[in-house]
Image (cartoon, rainbow, N blue to C red):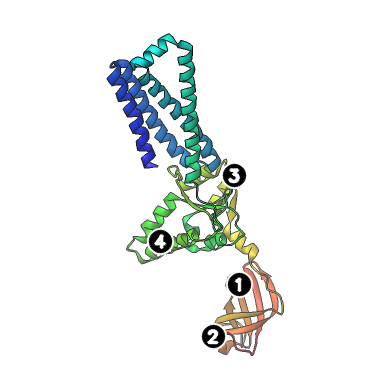
């Protein structure tokens, strides 16, 4: 692409210089200035095109190529008309010269259109057997989601159908944390960057880093980015969840999702629990499941500090969560 840009710059500037050489004057200088402005507008349009969906990029680049082809054709025609033979032909054969100029402009416009569309197709990532298929759905991950890893594990599973978008400011923040001399901040930054690398290496999952304007605040920037597209925000932040609901933006509550996927404990289940302290009653010991629910084990006070296998004898729901009662099983825990 840099070579193509350089060729266009040389073509426009060369045509303007040739026109100035053949027909010096203010008109030629004005034409050269117009060409330079069009080039600048084209480069700005290219930045916009790169941030658009593939279908929109193909339309926009095709239109830009058409306009650029017409512009180059007009400059070339102006330069050709200054040649003596072409000037004679134009004066004697007015209609034929006009038809030839029209055909020439159509040809260059068509070439520019095809070149623009071909450039987009060539720049699109290949769709091999391991490539991620294009998807209109996007999921935005924030800094916290990358650090604790839950959203990363969710994105690695087929439950999450769509592309993953990481805002640029999130990557910058993780890099700043990783460079910190504070051990805790350094660990959090390194963990987040490592999870990002793991996510980028996940097959059949497109991971894109996008610019998100957070000058008005992170919440406002994420909502503005997500509005108008099929973009969902993965977060456990209650404020962001409520703001997303108020603005009609879809958000996935990771905490609620974990609650929904948490398996129910029923009587007769076998669990492996580490006993951490004695219970209130004699010979009882207390341990905790991974979800934080308490397990009270009978006849196990001497096993405090060890990991044992237990059999659930009863389940009691409380405001604080699920209270599980169990008996120690004689078989050793793994």
Name which quarter of the figure residue 26 lies in: top left
Give 157 or 185, whichever is nearer the viewer.
157
* Secondary element at image label 2: loop
Q: Is residue 309 left or right of residue 25?
A: right
Residue hosting label 3: 246
Q: Looking at the picture, how far across and down is residue 216, in whole percent? A: 45, 42
CA gap, disc 3 to disc 1? 33 Å
**Residue 189, numbered circle:** 4
**Residue 306, numbered circle:** 2
For the residues labelled 4 and 1, say whether their Cβ atoms are less than 8 Å apart: no
CA gap, disc 4 to disc 1? 30 Å
Identify the mark nearer the N-term, 4 or 3. 4
Q: Nearer the viewer, mark 4 or mark 2?
A: 4
CA gap, disc 1 to disc 2? 18 Å
Crowd band around label 2 with a 10 angstrom C-alpha radius: few (<14), some (14–19), many (20+): few
Identify the mark nearer the N-term, 3 or 2. 3
Residue hosting label 1: 293
Q: Is residue 283 left or right of residue 65?
A: right
Give 149 or 87, whichever is nearer the viewer.
87
Q: Nearer the viewer, mark 4 or mark 1?
A: 4
Give 317 or 159, whichever is nearer the viewer.
159
């Amino acid at each position: 692409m840099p070579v193509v840009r350089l060729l266009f710059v040389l073509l426009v500037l060369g045509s303007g210089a040739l026109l100035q050489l053949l027909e010096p004057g203010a008109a030629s200088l004005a034409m050269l200035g117009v060409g330079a402005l069009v080039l600048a507008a084209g480069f700005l349009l290219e930045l916009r095109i790169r941030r658009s969906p593939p279908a929109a990029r193909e339309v926009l680049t095709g239109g830009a190529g058409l306009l650029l082809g017409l512009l180059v054709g007009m400059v070339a025609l102006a330069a050709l008309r200054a040649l003596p033979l072409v000037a004679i032909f134009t004066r004697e054969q007015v209609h034929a010269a006009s038809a030839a100029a029209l055909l020439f402009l159509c040809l260059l416009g068509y070439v520019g259109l095809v070149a623009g569309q071909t450039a987009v197709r060539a720049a699109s990532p290949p769709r091999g057997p391991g490539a991620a298929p294009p998807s209109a759905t996007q999921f935005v991950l924030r800094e916290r989601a990358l650090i604790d890893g839950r959203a990363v594990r969710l994105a690695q599973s087929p439950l999450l159908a769509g592309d993953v978008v990481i805002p640029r400011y999130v990557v910058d923040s993780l890099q700043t944390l990783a460079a910190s001399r504070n051990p805790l901040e350094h660990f959090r930054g390194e963990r987040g960057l490592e999870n990002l690398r793991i996510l980028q290496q996940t097959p059949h999952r497109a991971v894109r880093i996008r610019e998100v304007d957070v000058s008005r605040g992170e919440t406002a920037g994420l909502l503005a980015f997500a509005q108008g597209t099929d973009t969902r925000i993965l977060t456990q932040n209650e404020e962001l969840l409520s703001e997303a609901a108020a603005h009609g933006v879809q958000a996935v509550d990771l905490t609620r999702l974990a609650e929904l996927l948490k398996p129910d404990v029923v009587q007769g289940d076998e669990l492996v629990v580490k006993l951490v302290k004695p219970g209130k009653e004699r010979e009882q010991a207390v341990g905790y499941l991974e979800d934080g629910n308490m397990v009270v084990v009978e006849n196990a006070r001497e096993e405090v500090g060890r990991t044992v296998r237990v059999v659930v004898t009863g389940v009691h729901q409380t405001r604080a969560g699920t209270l599980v009662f169990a008996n120690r099983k004689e078989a050793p825990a793994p």
